[in-house]
Structure formats: C-alpha cells, structure tokens
Image (cartoon, rainbow, N blue to C red):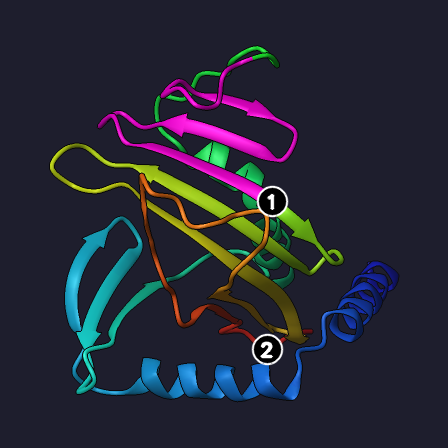
Amino acid sequence: ERGGREREREKESEKIRESLPSDAELQDLERMKEIAASTGWKKLLNQGQVTVFGKTDSKGNHYLKAVALVQAPVAQVFEYLQNRAGNFNAASLNVTRLPKQGDFGSTESGEEGHKIAVKDVYGIGSTLKMMESTDAYRAVWYSSFDLPWPLHNRDICWHTHDCLLSHGHAACIGRSVRHTSVPLQHAATRSNTLQHTKLLTSILTPQ
C-alpha cells in the first residue's frame, strides 16, 4: 500500500512539472484568489452541494463564484476536469446521439470526433469542440449556445490551461481568445470571458 501511494505521488509530481503555469498565469491566479476572498458577494443559487455567488465591481465587470465540496482527492478531480468533452456530454440532460453523418447545423444532438452537440430538456442547444490542443494540459475550445427567442444566440472561443500546482492544489485557467478557425458569427453574439478559473484545494493534509 505504501508503494502504491509513492507511485501515485510520483505521477502527480510529473504532472506538476509538465503543467507548470507561466509567471503571468500565476499572477492571474493570485488576482482571482483575491477576488474570490473579497467581500460583496451575493448568493444567487444553492443547488445540491453547489452554491453560486455573484458580484459586480466598480468598473462594471461581472463575477461569478461557485463553491462546492467534492469528496475525492484533488488529483482525481483534476483528471475529471481535464476530460471536458466527456463531462460536457455526460452532464447534458436528455441527450441522444446521432449517426456519424449527422448534420451538426441542426438542433439535434450528436457527436463526431472532438465536436459534441446536445439539447437539454429546456430546448437550449449547445456545442463544444476542441479547436487546437498543444499538449495534455493546454487547448483551445469553441462553444455555441442556441437560445430561445427573444434572446440572441451566444458563442465563445477560449483557451484553457490545466495546472497541477502542488500535491493537494490544482487550477484550471481559462480566458477568451481569438482563433483563425472560429471567426465572429453573424448569428451569435461572441462572449468575452476575461478570466475563468477553477481552484481545487484539498481540505486534508496529503499523506
């Protein structure tokens, strides 16, 4: 058993080295931690074990913070979050799969390669596609959201960097980017996310 724990710790150490964030990303992380720890948050939603808070700063920037307690090791949650495409499909409600030749321009659900399209029980269609992958920790994604009238459809293109910072600490850093394969769409309003970060912290001391 001790040997197994040592091997798992060695694997984590290797991931820490491979996913090392840049100095700029570390500064962004510290800034997001300060924002998360600041006052003025208002509770928006409490569903299951997840509580969502919101706030707006003096410049008009909107922030959302979701807090949840997960009964699993940080390394295990980190691996789960890395599988964005699989999580997107599994978390969707009332999902059906189309054949490989399915038309992804339709509102049906389907999957082909890295692109997944689903519709939830409220009729809101969503897509997720990996546009580019640098390595196991860095990638560019594109999502579109087919919203009901009178709302205008939304889409977003963003870069993600999954970082295992230390034993018991991890972060998933994301921000909106421009990508040549995803030009602005006339049928959708492009969302701009300045910073999207998931912070994972163990409440137990790693053995």
Q: Indicate the secondary structure of the residue bearing disc 1.
A: strand
In the image: residue 192, left or right of residue 178: left
Question: Given the image, on which type of amino acid does mark 1 rest?
Answer: Met
Q: Residue 113: image x %, image y %?
A: 65, 29
Give the label on residue 204, or none.
none
Question: Given the image, on which type of amino acid does mark 2 rest?
Answer: Thr
- Residue 76 in the magenta stretch? The answer is no
Look at mark 2 in the image and give the residue it sits on: 205
In the image: residue 33, left or right of residue 204: left
Q: How many marks?
A: 2
Residue at figure coordinates x 33%, y 43% from the top left: 186
Above or below 128: residue 13: below
Above or below 136: residue 164: below
Q: Residue 93: image x %, image y %?
A: 35, 28
C-alpha separation, residue under disc 1 versus residue under disc 2? 35 Å
Q: Which region shows up in magenta?
A: 102-130
Residue at figure coordinates x 52%, y 48% from the top left: 182
Compare residues 123 and 148 and report the one nearer the observer: 148
In the image: residue 4, left or right of residue 203: right
Look at mark 1 in the image and give the residue it sits on: 130
Compare residues 48 and 43 and report the one nearer the observer: 43
Q: Residue 45: image x %, image y %?
A: 18, 56
Quarter of the image that includes the C terminus: bottom right
Residue at figure coordinates x 16%, y 83% from the top left: 40
Crowding at dot 2, Cα within 10 Å, few <14 / some 14-19 / many 20+, comes out as: few
